[in-house]
Image (cartoon, helix red, strand yellow):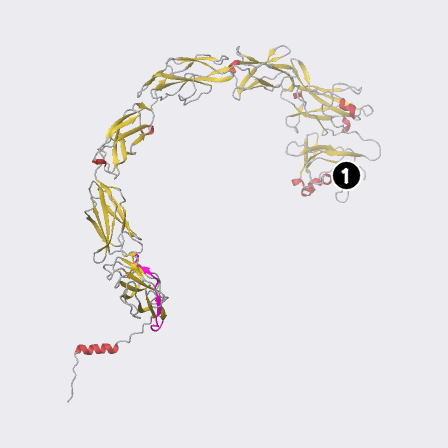
Amino acid sequence: MKKIIKIKEGTWLLLLLLLFLPLAENVYADYLAVNAGCENDLGGFGGGRVLDSAVDLPVGSILQYIYAGPNGVIDNPNYNGGVTGDDAIILTAAVGADTKYLIFSNTAGLFYHGVVYQYAGGTPIVYVRAWNANALATATRYGNSDLISPFTNPDNAPLPNDVGLATYQTGNQFFSATVTAPALNAYWASGTNKTITWNKNAASAVPNQWRLSYAADGANYSPIATIAGTLGQTGNTWNYTWLVPSHNVATAKVRIEALDSSGIPRATGESSAFYIDNQAPFAPVAVYANPSAWANATFTITWEAPTDSSVLTGIASSWYKIGTGGTQTAGGATSFQILMTAVTSGTKEVYVWLVDGAGNTDPANSTMVKIYPDKTAPSFSGLVNAVTNTPTKEVNLSFNWSGTTKSDVDSGLAATNLYYYFRNTLASGVSNTTVRNSGTGTNDAQASVAASAGESWNYLHVICRDQVNNLSPVLDSPGIWVDTTPATFTFNPVNGATEVPVTQDVVIDFNDPMLPAMVSFEVIRDSDGLAAAATGLWSNGNQKLTLTHDPLDYSTSYTCYIKSATNEVLLSSVPASATFQTAIPIKPSLVSDGRALSDPDTGSVTLRWTNPVSDYMGGIITYFPHDNAVDNASNLAKWNGLNVYSGEAQGVISQGVAAASAPDPDILGGTKIIISGLSTTETYYFKIFSYVDVPGGRFYNLNAETGNGVKVAALPKTMTGLGPQSFTLTLESKVTTGGHGINHFAMPFAAPWYAYDAVGAPLVVGGTNEVTNAYELVKAINLAAPENIVSTFAKWNPATQTATGVKITGNDPEAVSDALRAIGLAQGESYQAYLTQGITIVIRDTQ
């Protein structure tokens, strides 16, 4: 007979699922194993004991074997006695038990247990936590053993190692709470938010919750709040903001309780007694202001605190305001000061109210006191007059101020309210502490004061004073110049000066400022006492007097006088005058010019010069024929131009006004004259003497006795006879207009012409030193330089007084060589050359 097995539909489904489930993968973990405990070395493992308050921990007290996690660090227990962080409990045991060797049992302070555990990796660390109770719910302290390093194996549990633990105690509080605020006798005002702060020991567990309460009487507690264990936490410190209730007590306390997960308080902390104050202080009493009268000074306000329940926490500070609508200002605990900068002048009402130690205050509880600040200067107007005339040499000076008016709107004028100050500077901002002639004040309207000897400005300053010593603006007198010291001074030109230009100003420098109205001056011609018209100009703070005048006479003696316009002692004892001699006209320059000598046998020469000064009236030109047999260089230097020295008669060529001479186009503003009729066989020297005609006569510009005037180069001589001929061609570079020198010359004999430098070396141009045209002559001049110095070369036409020639660009004759070659050289013709420097060459008719 067959048995039929029936399987329910659900069972079939379960079997199918089991068939198709994959086999679970093996999870590999490392193993640790250790036997450890406090066995007091009875087991021979060197272990000590576990204690609670230095007494063996009772039998049955809880032990936790804990794996310290991958980080190997002991973490604090949590509020249920469990672990935190990465720690893990691997065995729970008890004191007084030995599950490995059964050596000791029911012995307080001793235990020994073995443990095997699979851990996640790394280097495992194990420790044993002991509690001071047989249940975590009643434990209050715990302790941790030293760290244990167990034996390990990666595949299966190894044989354990035996470790005896050193003696340790349950010295860590499981929970702790210490209130840090409010502090002892702290002042907390009702209705304010205050911060309650507390902390726990670093090794204590964080509770599940904190319960906060307070007792106004220090005994009967009322709840504040119950908060989560981590609310308000910063490390091992917590805080909670509390709105302080309304009480007026000095016995308040705050309590903090640590609650476990069952709501059981495991630790309690209480604050010291502190104040809760809900009442603002009453108004202060005996409020005084010092000074109590009008003053321009700091006012000090003092008071006494009320003696009633409103000052439970004492008086910490105060507030005040000036006037009913004034700004509230913080004051001190017993007094405060009001500076003058904080008030305006006039009667002021000051309202004072107090602040207690808890910060309670009420402006309605105020007391008023009056102060009387006065910082407004009196009104004082009018004039202070100088009675003594200025300037003066007297030292006793008088002033008055009879027309002034004065008043004060606050404290009123002082009984003797006028002060005067005597100074030699016009100073402002005078205070009544400044040295003064009147030390006690006066109601007079005049004063006599004594100035110091010497020279100074002197002023009287008058001020008005009110009852609190505010000073009015200063009224200043006009200055009085006191001068008791004679002045010293110097003249320019100095006494005895000569050759003084006739238009030069006379300048007198004084050693200190003068009064122009008290100084007079004259410039007198000594020959007849006639005064020259002169005008004085003061400068340099009236220490310099400049006398301008019409042109004085030439070569005339004058004296300048400085005098006092009054009888005041103003001038020193040194001579108050200076005598000087004016100059004669300056001499003009004189040069000769050979441009007009188209025929050297004509005996004519052109002289030219520049007029010396605007008042030059004319000149006399004299000449002196040079006789080599009689005159030598020494004798010639002594010729003064107006006297015969060599025995030969001198010639007077021209005498008259300079304007009669023809203008010279080559000298800006210059003059020239052509002198004819001279011998062609003599060498002449010329001088020009300018003159002016003045009432004293005609004055020539003679200057010294010898060596004056300009010696002019000799006229070219006519060359006669046979034999070699030569002449020296000296070309100058005297800057006139256009920045070049101008030279005129002629070829004095017929060709051929050969060029040599000043030492006789031939100037070779194109293979020879012969010059036949302007190009070759220019090249020879440049060779002698040696550089390109000729900028223009032209042929001169005496009839038309014009020149026709070539401008040499960049002084390079090659650039205009054809044009220069077109200008041929010929005897008797005049030529003109412009040079940038002077040069001398020699022209000969033979090589």
User: Which of the image's four quarters has the N terminus?
Assistant: bottom left
Q: Is residue 602 above or below residue 249?
A: above
Which amino acid type is shown beneath numbered disc 1?
Ala
Question: Helix, strand, or loop for circle 1?
Answer: strand
Question: What is the residue that sits farthest to the left in this orientation?
Answer: 1
Q: Is residue 799 above or below residue 484?
A: below
For label 1, count other residues whose C-alpha is less than 10 Å away and answer few (under 14), some (14-19) or many (20+). many
Position in image of residue 832 (x %, y %): 70, 34
Nearest the viewer among 841 and 265 is: 265
User: Which of the image's four quarters has the C terminus?
Assistant: top right
Q: Is there any visible trace of residue 225 in the rendered image? A: yes
Residue in view at x 81 percent, y 25 percent: 628
User: In the image, is 741 to the left or to the right of 202?
Assistant: right
Q: Is there any visible trace of residue 677 in the rendered image? A: no
Whether the magenta-drawn stretch holds residue 169 is answered as yes
Most common SS among magenta residues: loop
Q: Which residue is mark 1?
A: 755
Position in image of residue 258 (x %, y %): 24, 54
Position in image of residue 151 (x %, y %): 36, 69
Say how many tags the image has: 1
Position in image of residue 268 (x %, y %): 24, 52
Whether the magenta-drawn stretch holds residue 797 is answered as no
The quadrant holding residue 93 is: bottom left
The quadrant holding residue 261 is: bottom left
Q: What is the magenta range?
A: 153-171
